[in-house]
Amino acid sequence: MSDLSIQLHWQRSELVLQTGKYSNAHTVQFNDAYDVRVDAAPDWGGDPANTNPEQALASALSSCHMMTFLALAAKAGWPVAGYHDRAVAHLGKNARGQMSVTRIDLHPVVRFDTGFSPDDGELEKMQHRAHRYCFIANTLADSVEINIL
C-alpha cells in the first residue's frame, strides 16, 4: 500500500512557551510545494483566516467521498457534470468526555449532463455506496453523517 506524507513546520515566536501565551499557527506542506497556514479553531484562540485541523479533516472526508462517488458514477455510466459539497465538522465531547470531532455532515449536490437524472433513491444509494468505500470514512467509522440535498 501507499505511504502518503506531509511536512509540518512550527516555530515559537514568543520568548518562552507558557500555557495560553503562545501561537499554534504553523504551516503544513503538501508534496514539498504547497503550503497551507494552519492554526487552532477560532473558538480555541486560532486565527480565523487560517485553516484548522477540524476543517482539514472535513475537507479530507469531503474530497475522498467525492472522488469515490465519481469513480462509482463513471463505472455506472452516470454523466456527472459537476459536484459541490459543504462539509461541516461538529466539535463536542465524545463518549469518554474528551473533546472530539463528533460528527461531520456532508451536503453533496451533484449535477448531471442534460437529459440524465437518476431518481432520488438511486442517487441516495450511490451516495451511501461512496460513503461505504471512501478510505477516510472507513477511518472515521461511525462519526460521519451524510446529508443529501
Image (spheres, grey):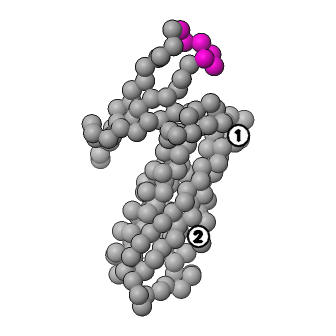
**Amino acid found under the numbered disc labelled 1:** Lys
Residue 148 numbered tag: 2
Residue 148 at what x, y percent from top left?
A: 58, 70
Q: Which residues are magenta?
A: 16-21
Label 1, residues with CA under 10 Å away: few <14, some 14-19, many ≥20: few
Where residue 97 appears, as percent x and y from the top left, is 72, 35
| Neighbourhood count class around disc 2 (C-alpha, 10 Å): few under 14, some 14–19, many 20 upward | some
Mark number displayed over residue 58: none
The quarter of the displayed image where residue 3 is located = top left
Residue at the disc numbered 1: 93
For image coordinates 42% across by 91% down, the residue present is 115
What is the residue that sits farthest to the top in this orientation? 15
Residue farthest toward the left in the current orientation of the protein: 32
Please identify the quarter of the rendering in which residue 30 is found. Answer: top left
> How far across and how far down the image is residue 141, in percent?
55, 51
Q: Is residue 138 visible in the rendered structure shown here?
A: no
Callout 2: SS:
loop
> Percent position (x, y) of residue 88?
59, 53
Q: CA distance from mark 1 to mark 2?
A: 25 Å
Residue at image point 55% right, 60% down = 86
